[in-house]
């Protein structure tokens, strides 16, 4: 018999359920995840190196997990800060999922980390769809990437809790138009804060750590328009028990 | 390109639903809503879906995607608009940034069209592991 069955299941429900569980487990350990998203070469690792060193100077326990398709170069760089660092090799996969992250957090990081920085795979498309159980999602763009980056990658920038501009020490040399960049961010994510940083000059490093610690301490985080759920009835059952009502035969 | 991950998730969820139903012999089609802001390319997804279905009860199934345009409503002034691409998410009438996104982020399996056997299917062939 031919039958049409209503499923009404969100495709990403499983990841969202895993992220929800992971967020709760980490909260019980006193740890908040900061998910860092950007295109390759935006300077995520350089900025993160500075954040880790500063956290150590301030005696804030932190750890970092860095994801790449291949090589352990980023973990080697970040480990110089002296904080616990782990490399996730995705073997070609373009993004991290909550379950993948969770598998690396069994008994790690050692001790109680207040913040766990997760440097996602350099990619502004795929990682945007996957909640990693983060408390703060930071989307970065360097001044060399063009002011229209937020419009070209609206899902990534539209779901950011905080937008970070990197490499501002060379902004003038590359004629970065800050006002246009800010207007483009505002178009896809009204009200989100844009933080200017330079890892080389040490600008904005403390401000970013302060934002992350505030979020970890429960300060309200910006809610992007794109993250607001429409108020309508759906049957999203993350455990896979979606309503199944035969609607024909 | 995370469409393969999405395709595998769709196939996995339909397989689970078919297992719960108990007597599904073949899946003809899967209807999926893909919002304009979901970050998924329907053509790439269709390509991956065909590969992800191979060797499962979904083998040969068709993926029917329904595009859902992004629609927003301004909380203060109640103006409604199509957000377009790239999306405009602050109100084009009053400029407010407190917008409700009514549609556009969907990535939802709506329904499945499948073949099933009699209600008490005791006559199926045992699978190799059961012999």
Image (cartoon, coloured by chain):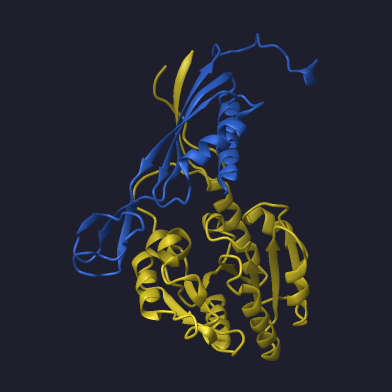
Query: Outermost residue, top direction?
Result: B123
Residue at (62%, 87%) from the top-left corner? A200
Which residue is painted at 52% across and 17% down in the image? B115
Residue A109 in view, yes or no: no
Q: Is residue B34 left or right of residue A100?
A: left
Q: Colour of chain A?
A: yellow
Q: Residue at x 69, y 52 (%)?
A: A92
B129 or B9: nearer the eye? Answer: B9
| Residue A132 vertical placement versus B4 (above, below) | below
Q: Where's residue A210, x and y in %?
A: 55, 84
- The percent coordinates of residue B47 (x first, y second) are 55, 35
Query: Could you tell me residue A181's position as x and y percent?
Result: 40, 74
Q: Residue A152 location, x and y as percent?
A: 43, 61
Instruction: State the quadrant of the C terminus of chain B.
Output: top right
Instruction: Work out whether residue A167 or residue A101 is closer to the camera in this orientation and state it.
Output: A167
Q: Is residue A75 left or right of residue A208?
A: right
The residue lying at 42 percent from left, 63 percent from top is A158
Label count reads: 0
Answer above or below: position of A21 versus B69. below
Q: Quadrant of the rendered structure where residue A190 is?
A: bottom left
Q: Is residue A159 visible?
A: yes
In the shown orientation, is residue B65 left or right of residue A116?
Answer: left
* Closer to the camera in the image, A159 or B51: B51
Residue A27 position by quadrant: bottom right
Which chain corresponds to the colour blue? B
Q: Is residue A164 above or below residue B117?
A: below
* Depicted A26 relative to depicted B40: above or below: below
């Amino acid at each position: 018999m031919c039958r049409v069955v209503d499923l009404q299941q969100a495709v990403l429900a499983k990841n969202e359920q895993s992220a929800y569980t992971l967020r709760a487990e980490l909260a019980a350990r006193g740890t908040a995840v900061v998910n860092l998203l950007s295109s390759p070469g935006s300077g995520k690792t350089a900025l993160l190196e500075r954040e880790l060193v500063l956290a150590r100077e301030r005696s804030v326990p932190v750890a970092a997990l860095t994801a790449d398709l291949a090589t352990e170069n980023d973990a080697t760089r970040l480990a110089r800060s002296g904080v616990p660092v782990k490399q996730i090799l995705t073997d070609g996969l373009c993004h991290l999922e909550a379950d993948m992250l969770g598998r690396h957090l069994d008994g790690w990081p050692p001790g109680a980390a207040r913040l766990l920085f997760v440097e996602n795979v350099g990619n502004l498309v795929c990682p945007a769809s996957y909640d990693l159980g983060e408390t703060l999602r930071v989307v970065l763009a360097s001044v060399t990437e063009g002011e229209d980056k937020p419009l070209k990658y609206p899902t990534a920038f539209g779901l950011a809790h905080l937008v970070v501009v990197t490499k501002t020490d060379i902004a003038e040399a590359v004629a970065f138009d800050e006002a246009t960049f800010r207007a483009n961010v505002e178009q896809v994510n009204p009200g989100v804060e844009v933080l200017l940083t330079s890892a080389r000059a040490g600008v904005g490093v403390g401000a970013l750590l302060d934002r992350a610690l505030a979020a970890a301490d429960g300060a309200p985080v910006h809610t992007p328009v794109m993250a607001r759920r429409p108020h309508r009835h759906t049957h999203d059952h993350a455990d896979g028990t979606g309503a199944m009502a035969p609607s024909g035969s | 390109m995370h469409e393969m991950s999405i395709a595998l998730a769709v196939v996995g969820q339909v397989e689970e639903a078919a297992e719960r139903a108990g007597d599904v012999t073949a899946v003809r089609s899967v209807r999926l809503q893909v919002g304009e802001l979901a970050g998924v390319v329907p053509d790439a997804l269709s390509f991956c879906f065909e590969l992800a279905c191979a060797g499962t009860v979904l083998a040969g199934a068709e993926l029917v995607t329904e595009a859902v345009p992004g629609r927003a409503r301004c909380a203060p002034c109640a103006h409604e608009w199509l957000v377009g691409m790239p999306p405009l998410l602050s109100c084009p009438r009053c400029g407010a940034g407190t917008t409700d996104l009514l549609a556009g982020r969907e990535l939802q399996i709506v329904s499945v069209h499948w073949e099933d056997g009699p209600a008490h299917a005791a006559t199926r062939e045992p699978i190799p592991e059961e012999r």
